[in-house]
Amino acid sequence: MSDEDDSSFLSLPSAAFSQRPSLTAELNETNTPSQKLLIETLQDKVCEFQARLRSEEVTRHLLLQQLQQQHSVQRETRGGGVGVVTLQEEQTSSRPNGVRVLQPAGEQSSDRLSCPGEEQLVTRLHTQVEELEEKLLDQTREVERLRSELGATDLEKQLELLLVENERLKQELKSCRSSELQKLDTAAETCSCSHCPFSQDVESLRREVSRWESQARQRERRLAELERELLEKSSRVETLQRQLDDSTRQLEESRRRQEETEQKLALRLQECEAELARQAAAPPKVKYVTQTVEVESADSHRVLAEMQTKNGALQEQLSVQRQLLRELETQLHESQRTCAQLRTQILVYEGEMERAQGQLEVEMQNLEEEKNREIEEAFLRAESEMKAVHENLAGVRMKMLSLQRALRTLTNDYKCLKRQVQDFPFMLDKAITEAKQEICLVIGEVSSTNQELLRKYKREMNLRKKCHNELVRLKGNIRVFCRVRPVSQEEQDSTDAKTMLSFDSDDDAILYLSNKGKIMTFELDKVFPPQATQEESDECLCLISLRLLFSEVTEKAPDWDYKISVSMVEIYNETLRDLLGENPTDKLDIKMNPDGSGQLYVPGLTNFTVQSPEDINRVFELGHMNRATACTNLNEHSSRSHALLIITVSGFNSATGNRTQGKLNLVDLAGSERIGKSGAEGSRLREAQCINKSLSALGDVINALRSKHSHVPFRNSRLTYLLQDSLSGDSKTLMMVQVSPLPANMSESVCSLKFAQRVRSVELSSSSSRRHENSSTSSSPTHDSVEVTGEFCCCCW
């Protein structure tokens, strides 16, 4: 950091102190930046010194390693007994035979080359270490001096003075407030009359006094804030002192580590000197060699060159150390300049603090004088107003006498009203009794009207039932729907996936079928295409029937009490099974009801009472799990039996004593099978035979009903016998036929559609006795209050 940067960074706007009236702003602008700046500068210096000490330790360690390597090379050279030798040629006269004598001058020359360089390097290192120690001691002393100066600043003295002044001002404010309150209480006692015309002036005086009290409280809060800020400043000074202590400890730790490193270096240097002295004291060795001396002399020259190279590297490192030393000296000068600037800044701060203290004292004196002046003025105004109050007191007393006469008049009126209030409950009871009598008369009239409306409603219901039965009879009674199933993914991938069925866009009851080049037309009650959803196709079957049933039961609940029970059976291999019982494999039988109604029932059949369509769905799921299914070539989950869901509704009218009973049969018929296509064998073959037999019996019953034969073969099959009530009498029957659109299933589709047309042409009729039984038990229009009553069969083919 340069001198200009330090001066610009440490400079503070001293002119701002004279422009700020409050002591808080002055403290914020003077003490906080200087203390933060001082701490940051000292911390930066300490970090730089620590980094340089670490770099010097690393450099010394590298130099020591190089010296050790050189020393080991020299010992190896001396241990081999061959050194740098000088060849001297004797005179030819004294050595006639031409023999040359070699002197062992290698050891002495190498010692002379290495020892002076090492001694100089050690001396320089010692010098640098001593200089660094001196600089470190100077920096430590400077830090301690700055810390002592900061610890003994005038901030603490100013803090004590401000605290004392704050306590004194608080005491004065308390005394002034108590005296003002006493004066106001005295004035309030003298003008305690509530009708005094000068009460508003008194209130204004009170508000003015409260305003001055609020101003005094604001000044107290301001003094409290100043006190809190002074405490914060003192805590910051303590924090800075702790940081300076930490920095000092770090410097001492760094110096201790440096001393330990120097001691280690000194020990190593002593060992090196002792080794060199021991080698120098060793006796020289003389050898006489021949031509091989030249080779060994070349090796010695190479070692000498390496030593010179290392010596150059040491010189470079020495220059680096000197450069570092110069930088440390520069930084030392900069820190000294920074300390001088800090001292100057501290003096400026002290002057500013004294000026701020003077301004604060002057301001407090002005406030005190203003407070006393306002109190005196308020007291004078209160005295003058009290005189006017006493003067008007006589007039107020005269007004009080006139008000007393008015009070007596009001008292008499109150007593009269009180007597009227006491008589009011008797008048109210009389009015309530008359109102009750009128209400009873109106209720009687409404009740008779309701009875007439109920009689008309029953008559209209009977007429509606009769018209509905007549409409169904005219249409053929048995309604037939057809659903064309969608093509599965496996069937779409096959080659024969062309649809052979088409629909009429104008009439949803006509279906066209292309069979062997001919177009066959089938007219039914409604046809559902493959893209129709399950909700659309079931809208007229299960869901709407159950919803209407429970909605009618809910609407008739006040007059009728209905009980709805559900049972579920299957016809497997011409055997009747209970799907809701504990053992579904038990065989059941169909018998005539002993109550004389002529209806059929199944003894031992399990019944569940339900309250909503959701309960029926749960019962259906239970029975569906017990139903017999198997895998064939045509269907992975093929139904091997016919299933019936029987819903029985029993109603009782508590008002009339009438009873009604109706039954809703939901039938799922297993489809007919061709043994050649399904590949049924064993038990599957017997199941297919029983299914085809029961469907054939159903066809015979339909033909007999269509031809209006006197005898209908219901007993030829368990299926037709159980559906006898649904296929005769006033029952309403609906059949859903499902066909395939693929050419591979064309023959089955044609047979199913022809059978559907025959069923649609059947007109159900009943004998007079059968109709009489129904009218006396369950399906009478007179006693039937639920639309879905009587025998209802929904057959799915």
Image (spheres, rainbow, N blue to C red):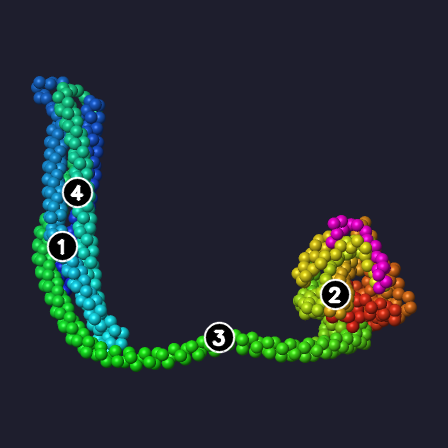
Question: How far, Cα to Cα, is label 2 from label 3?
Answer: 58 Å
Q: Is residue 591 magenta?
A: yes
Which residue is label 2 attached to?
651
Q: State the mark number for residue 269.
A: none
The residue that disc 4 covers is 248
- The amino acid type, in three-letter code, at marker 2 is Gly
Is residue 448 or residue 669 the one in the foreground? 448
Q: Which residue is disc 1 drawn over? A: 164
Q: Which residues are magenta?
A: 580-597
Residue 529 position in % (x across, y down): 70, 69
**N-terminal-most mark, 2 or 1:** 1
Task: Work out which quarter of the rendered image holds the C terminus and state it.
Answer: bottom right
Q: Earlier in the sequence, mark 4 or mark 2?
A: 4
Whether residues under marks 2 and 3 lie with C-beta atoms below 8 angstroms apart, the answer is no
Residue identifier under label 3: 422
- Which type of secondary structure does the marked residue at label 3 adopt? helix
